[in-house]
Image (cartoon, rainbow, N blue to C red):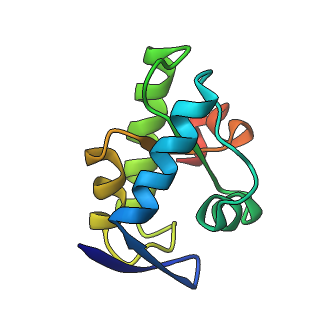
């Protein structure tokens, strides 16, 4: 299965082998952190200053993450984040590996959503 999506204007081709690699990185880290190098998608999202990626398993504050999750959904549905369709976002969540959320400085001010 292969997905073509534009993430902030950059085409990123995703297939199952990419996600095996992401999961392996998550398992290796084991402390709820993502490797910040060797991940083109992560670097592209992070470099734009809007998004970061966090593993969905073992979140430190579930209530806070649920708030963030609803906030990012609202931003995507209003078109403020340049993802062509929500399928990419929901595909990330369906894999139960990553959740997309706003960086901390945005999350502290819910009005920005």
Total numbered badges shown on the rendered structure: 0
Q: Residue at x 57, y 36 (%)?
A: 110
Image position, residue 93 (x, y; %): 33, 46
Q: Quadrant of the N terminus?
A: bottom left
Image position, residue 47 (x, y; %): 76, 64
Q: Is residue 112 above or below residue 109?
A: below
Q: Residue at x 59, y 32 (%)?
A: 28
**Residue situated in front as seen by the camera: 82 or 60:** 60
Q: Quadrant of residue 49?
A: bottom right
- Indicate left or right for 93 with 45 as reference: left
**Residue situated in front as seen by the camera: 38 or 46:** 38
**Residue situated in front as seen by the camera: 58 or 52:** 58
Q: Is residue 38 above or below residue 60?
A: below
- Indicate left or right for 74 with 107 as reference: left
Q: Quadrant of residue 69?
A: top left
Image position, residue 19 (x, y; %): 41, 56
Q: Is residue 66 above or below residue 107?
A: above
Image position, residue 18 (x, y; %): 45, 63
Q: Residue at x 39, y 51 (%)?
A: 74
Q: Residue at x 71, y 60 (%)?
A: 38
């Amino acid at each position: 299965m292969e997905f073509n999506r534009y993430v902030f204007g950059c085409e990123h081709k995703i297939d199952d082998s990419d996600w095996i690699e992401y999961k392996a990185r998550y398992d290796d880290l084991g402390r709820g952190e993502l490797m910040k190098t060797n991940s083109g998608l992560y670097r592209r999202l992070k470099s734009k200053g809007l998004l970061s990626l966090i593993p969905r398993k073992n979140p430190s504050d579930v209530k806070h993450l649920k708030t963030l999750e609803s906030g990012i959904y609202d931003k995507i549905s209003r078109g403020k984040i340049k993802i062509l369709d929500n399928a990419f976002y929901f595909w990330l969540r369906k894999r139960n590996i990553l959740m997309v959320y706003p960086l901390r400085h945005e999350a502290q001010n819910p009005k920005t959503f």
